[in-house]
Image: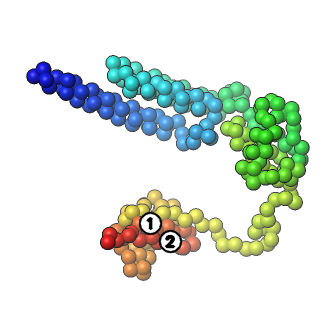
Amino acid sequence: MPFFMPILKLVIFLITTITRTAILYFFLTFGIRIMGKRQIGDMQPNELVITLLISEIAAIPLQDTSQPLLFGIVAIFMLIILEITVSIIALKSNTMRKLLNGKSIVVIKNGVIDQNAMKKVRMTVIDLIELLRGQNVFDISTVAFAVLEVNGDLSVLLKAPNQPLTAKDMQIKKNQEALPLPVISDGKIIKESLSALEISQGEILNKLNSQRCRVCDVFLMTLDRNKNINLIKKRKDT
């Protein structure tokens, strides 16, 4: 019996760790989902702080199994409530929104860099040029306005002569814009896409019949409102 005690302790430790990890994973996923869908680069300062705090708190009960899991869950839950509350207040109060997130600043006006604004945001000219290149702008004199957003992105409006031509400028009539949506993925029909396209499952099956194909044979099928389809069949095992 003493021989099996270390093995038994190891098994119990592994089961405990896996269970605690799974619980925290699903709880954190649910919490982040409530907070909203943003990538790290698009987060406001307060959102980034909350995310970092949550990750740190979640790591404590994972690393130290002697810590009650409930304490970590309660702390994370309180941070999520705090973030949602602050976000609601920020929606109602411009002062709170500016205090938490700051405000956008115009750094280029009519092709001229605003040096005072650059000092306020502590941005160098090299940083500005790099951001402009990211917007495919290589000549500052062609910029009507450049606004540094609170998330660090640079929004650029070119002067009228330097703006790209559009179909409206050239008086070209185009068909109505149509976004292709996946209607079949890995042999399964996506009902949400059918609802968005206002098309029935029967119509999809008819299109597949015309292609001499079954639903289970489709790897990916996209369809737009103009009824244009793109069909990729599954590869057959050789």
Q: Can residue 107 be seen in this view?
A: yes
Task: Specify the quadrant of the image occupied by residue 65.
Answer: top left
What's the residue at 86%, 32% (across, down)? 116
Question: Quick one: SS at disc 2?
Answer: strand
Tell me which amino acid carries mark 2: Asn
Mark 2 or 1 closer to N-term? Answer: 1
Question: Quick one: SS at disc 1?
Answer: strand
Residue 140: percent from left, percent from top: 85, 49
| Circle on res. 161 | none
On the image, numbered disc 2 is attached to which residue? 230
Is the residue marked by circle 2 packed among few (<14), some (14-19), or many (20+) residues within 10 Å? few
Specify the quadrant that holds the N terminus: top left
Q: How far apart are marks 2 and 1 (CA)?
A: 8 Å
Specify the quadrant that holds the C terminus: bottom left
What's the residue at 83%, 46% (across, down)? 145
Residues at marks 2 and 1 touching, judged by CB atoms closer than 8 Å: yes
Residue 200: percent from left, percent from top: 44, 68
On the image, numbered disc 1 is attached to which residue? 220
Tell me which amino acid carries mark 1: Leu
Residue 19 against residue 234 in the figure, above or below: above
Front residue of this view, candidates 180 and 158: 158
* Left or right of 15 on screen, residue 84: right
What's the residue at 16%, 23% (across, down)? 5
Is the residue marked by circle 1 packed among few (<14), some (14-19), or many (20+) residues within 10 Å? some
